[in-house]
Image (cartoon, helix red, strand yellow):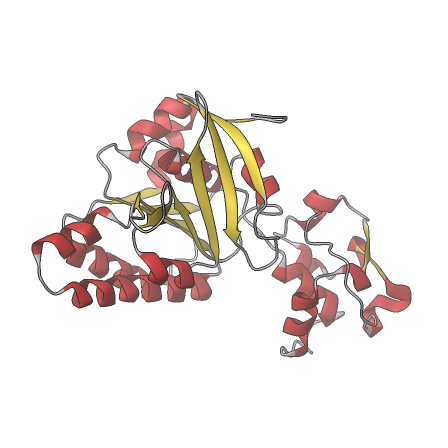
Amino acid sequence: MSFLSGCQGSPPPCCQGGLVRWADVPQCISTGSRLPGLLGAGTVLKYKKLPETIKESYQKTERKNIKDSCFSYIVMSMRVVPTGVDVFDVLLGGGYSAGITTFYGPRGVGKTTVCIMSAQAVLAAGKKVIYISTENISPVVRMTQIDEGNKKLLSHLLFFTPETFEEQTAICEKLRRTTERSIGMVIVDSIAPLYRLRRAEQPDIEGAIRELGRQMAYLTDLSRKMEIPILITTQVYADIEKQDAIKMVGGEILHYGSTCLIELQKRAHNLRRAILEKHPSVPQGNSVVFTLCEKGIVSRTGKE
C-alpha cells in the first residue's frame, strides 16, 4: 500500500519485534475501520515502515486509556471512507479520510459524477449524505441514471439548493452546529458559481473572499467534529500569465483549506485523468486514468 513508505524508528512496546498483527488490535478500534479489508485479516505490519508523520502525530497524542495505544492510533489515522470508484480508492490509498477533498476541473470532466458515486457508496453503507447543489442538473436525476436500483436509498439524501452566496454560507453555518451522527458525508457541488456571481454583482470583492473563507471554516469544523469527509467541487479559468494553464476558482482559500486536492483533466474521447496535488499521506503527483460514461466512471488500466 502507498502509506507503507520506508521510514525508520524504534517500535513502541505494543510492537515488540517490530511486528504487529491485526488480530492484536483492540476490537473497539478495529470495528468500522477498513484497514483489515485493505491489508487482509492477520496482516503483519512493520512499524518501521509506517509513515513518519503518523508516528509524530502519536507522540503528540495521549491515548493511555486504550490498550496498545500506539498502534490503535495508527489504525484510526488510516480509517477511510470508500469513494465508490475503484480508481479513486487506489489514488487515495483506500478512500476519503476526514477533512475537505476538493475536485477541480473544466465543465463536463466528471466532478459531479465522482461526487454522486461517492454519495451512493456512503448511502449504501447506511449513512446519510448532505448534498448542497448549485449546478443545473439534479444529483437525484444523475444518481438514478447511474444506478436505478439505488432509488430506495434516496430517502437518506438531504438536498439543499441555495440561490445566493449568502444562503450557501447560512447552510454551511447551520451544518456546523449539527450533532446528527448518522451523517456520513457532506458534498458541495459546486462551491464556485454563487461565489463568482457574488463577486460579479457586488464591488466588495474582499467581502466575497472572506465569506468563502467562512464557508471553508464551517465545513472544516464540521468534518473535525463528526470525523467525516467533505467533498467540494470547483470550476477553473484560464491563467492569463501562463499559456495553456488553468487556475481553480477559489484560489488559495480552497487550496489551503483542503486536506486533499485533485485535478480532473479531459483526455482523448471519454478518457479522464485525476492528478493528486495534495494529500496528508499519499505522494503528490500520483494519477489515475478512467473513462467517463453515462453510467458513471469505469476503471481503466494501461496507457491512454
In the rendering, at what x and y percent does residue 180 appear?
A: 38, 58
Q: Residue at x 84, y 74 (%)?
A: 13
Q: Is residue 114 above or below residue 206?
A: above
Nearest the camera: 282 or 239? 239
The quadrant in which residue 295 appears is: top left
Relative horizontal placement of residue 238, taking residue 227 as reference (left or right) = left
Q: Looking at this rendering, what residue extends furthest in the right direction?
A: 17
Is residue 237 rendered to the left or right of residue 164? right
The image shows residue 245 at horizontal and vertical percentages of 38, 44
Quadrant position of residue 46: bottom right
Which residue is rendered at x = 34% and y = 49% of the image? 247
Q: Quadrant of the C terminus?
A: top right
| 10 vs 202: above or below | below
Q: Position of residue 149 (x, y in %)?
A: 43, 23
Q: Which residue appears at 41% of the width and 63% of the height?
A: 256
Q: Is residue 300 left or right of residue 113?
A: right
Q: Is residue 130 above or below residue 116?
A: below
Q: Decide if residue 236 is in sight here.
A: no
